[in-house]
Amino acid sequence: MPNVATAEQRTAQRRMVGRVNASGVLNRDGLAFWREADCGEFYPDADEVAADLAVLQVPCEVVTAYRFPLANSRSQRPRKGYEVRIATKDLPSLEAWMPSLKDRPPMPEDAPGWSFMYFQPKPGRMEVFFHTRFAAAWPWWTEKQAGRMGLLCAQCGYDLRKQDDETRLPYNIPTKPGGFRLVCGVCCDDGNDVMDQAERAAGAAMVAAGAASPVPVQAAPSVPATFTGGGS
């Protein structure tokens, strides 16, 4: 904290201390505050939180993030919101205004961060993807809440957030192109069947494309102006 803080900084400091204690989520990647879209009428929105951090000279970024739908909501679509994220490397800037943050327990190296890792079968290969649009609290949602966000196996209901069983890692096996439907490795043979199917489909598409292409016709050789061949 500066030796002499302005009145504006003192006010922002008080607000941020309250927010950290009330709704701050700390993980391996940093500290986050989620705000539902269009909540400004009732609560400080993400832009207001970011503005207070700017007054305190604490670097942050605002990203789009989703949380589970409320149980009594008419719509069961994920709730869109905006999350203010302070990276771990920038937390000392906030600690200067909130010394109690220094007393937080050390975060294990394998602790979850902003993103959720899953595997995506591709033709002939397997790729690792990261879902970055979940709110930072996703590791601590109840199973029911996680299920509403597609984080349980779509076939057996296994909680895919655990990722401590190599046979039950998450694979995206959508029912339609571009979809997001996670299935555990036990239920999808570690994505091998889908990977093989995708490779066969890609091969068939290439064959079909080749068959549909017109066969080029070779040009006839030009007739020589004079015949130079031998003969009597």
Image (tube, rainbow, N blue to C red):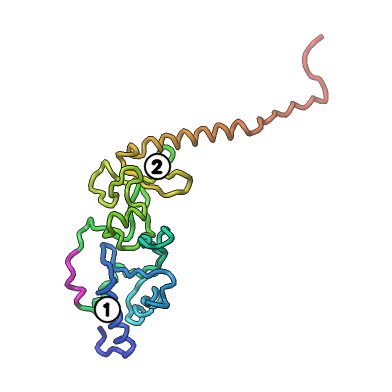
Q: Confirm whether the magenta stretch covers residue 142.
A: no
| Amino acid beneath label 1 | Gly
* Nearer to the camera, 5 or 225: 5
Quarter of the view holding residue 106: bottom left
| Amino acid beneath label 2 | Pro
Circle on res. 145:
none
* Nearer to the camera, 54 or 222: 54
The magenta-colored residue range is 100-106
Quarter of the image with the N terminus is bottom left
**Residue at coordinates 28% horizontally, 46% vertically from top-left?**
158
Q: Give coordinates of residue 113: x percent, y percent.
A: 29, 60
**Residue at coordinates 70% horizontally, 29% vertically from top-left?**
217
What residue is pinned by disc 1? 18
Mark 1 neighbour class, 10 Å CA radius: few under 14, some 14 to 19, many 20 or more: few
What residue is pinned by disc 2? 121
* Marks 1 and 2, how far apart at CA: 44 Å
Q: Give coordinates of residue 164: x percent, y percent.
A: 23, 48
